Amino acid sequence: MDGDRLYSIGELARRTGLTVKTVRFYSDRGIVPPTDRSAAGYRRYDDGALARLELVRTLRELGLDLPTIHRVVDRELSLAEVAATHAEALAVQVRVLRLRHAVLSAVAERRLGPQDAEALQQLARLSEAERRDLVGGFLDAVFDGVGADPAFAGVRRSMTPRLPDDPDVQQARAWVELAGLASDPGFRADLRRIAEDLAADRALAGTTVPRRDVAATVRDLVAPALAAGVDPTSARADPTVAALTAQCAQLCGRPDDADLRRRLLHRLETVNDPRRDRYVELLAVVNGWRAPEALAPALDWSVAALRARVQR
């Protein structure tokens, strides 16, 4: 290309893909001033102006405002510094958009009304400090005052969601739903009863040594029977139920008798709350953990087996 060539506004527009009106606007603002004028007074631009206009178009597409662009193309500001600032601002916008997407998806999937939608939106707007307060209040409601057993500190940590600074879409959606569960007084009360039952069992057993959760023990013991399709009310289930009650008697420090079966049935009915499974599932998504194995199938089987035998 001839380095002395000059372009009209129309030619500049065609080469950059911008409208004549836009090129004229940038020229009027002094962002891409004309290099010269024709004898008739029309503006003319050289290759430098063309390159400058290409840069302006790129910066506008990246969302920079015109005063900032003016200072960048005039080399009053470092493009790298401006880019870093805008990248940080865009990262914040991305997080906000992900949370908004999570709220809208939840509203659509659950067919929520205006009040529920507003509640979810408020959860999505929470700052990091507010999220910590919500989670802290939830865990305090569940665990405060159930005893000084150090095992509960570990359980509390394992139930603590930590939303990353830059959550992906799935984490954002999981957080919104999890925050709703954590704000549910009924769910808090149910988990509190589970914690109190566990504290009572551990006090009776006279131990502070961490032991397996009863629900996890049940899941592992009944897994073979579930896989084999054993009817929980049938005689074929008796060996599994006997192993289950013996193991739980040892965990709870109680004799393996009819009273234990009634207590265990009550415990499993309390634990067998779909919201508990869902909380653990959402927690894994938010924290980036491996998806947990659902407890509901094993708990359903065990509850049915114990009911049949407690009523005999």
Image: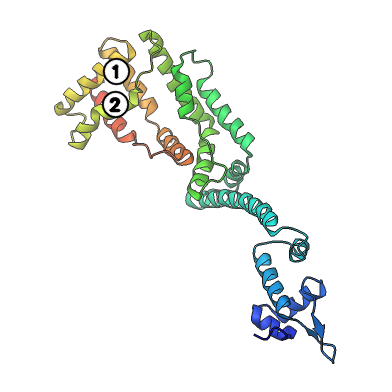
Q: Is residue 307 above or below residue 55?
A: above
Q: Is residue 184 left or right of residue 118?
A: left
Q: Is residue 160 above or below residue 7?
A: above
Q: Name the residue type under label 2.
A: Val
Give the x, y percent position of residue 13: 69, 81
Quarter occupied by residue 11? bottom right
Depth order, front residue of 211/221: 211
Secondary structure at badge 2 equals helix
User: Marks 1/2: CA distance?
Assistant: 9 Å
Depth order, front residue of 97/222: 97
Depth order, front residue of 278/306: 278
Q: Residues within 10 Å of mark 1 (few under 14, many from 20)?
A: many
Q: Is residue 46 above or below residue 73?
A: below
Give the x, y percent position of residue 57: 67, 70
Depth order, front residue of 272/167: 167
Q: Is residue 52 above or below residue 270?
A: below
- Residue 181 visible somewhere in the drawing: yes
Write the residue at 49% across / 15% down: 146
Kindly identify which numbered label has been placed on residue 148. none
Secondary structure at badge 1 equals helix
Write the residue at 48% across / 40% down: 286
Give the x, y percent position of residue 227: 20, 37
Give the x, y percent position of residue 282: 45, 39
Classify the position of the N terminus by image quarter.
Answer: bottom right
Q: Residues within 10 Å of mark 2 (few under 14, many from 20)?
A: many
Write the residue at 24% across / 16% down: 246
- Residue 304 visible somewhere in the drawing: no
**Residue located beneath label 2 in the image:** 218
Pick out the residue farthest to the left. Answer: 236
Kindly identify which numbered label has been placed on residue 248. 1
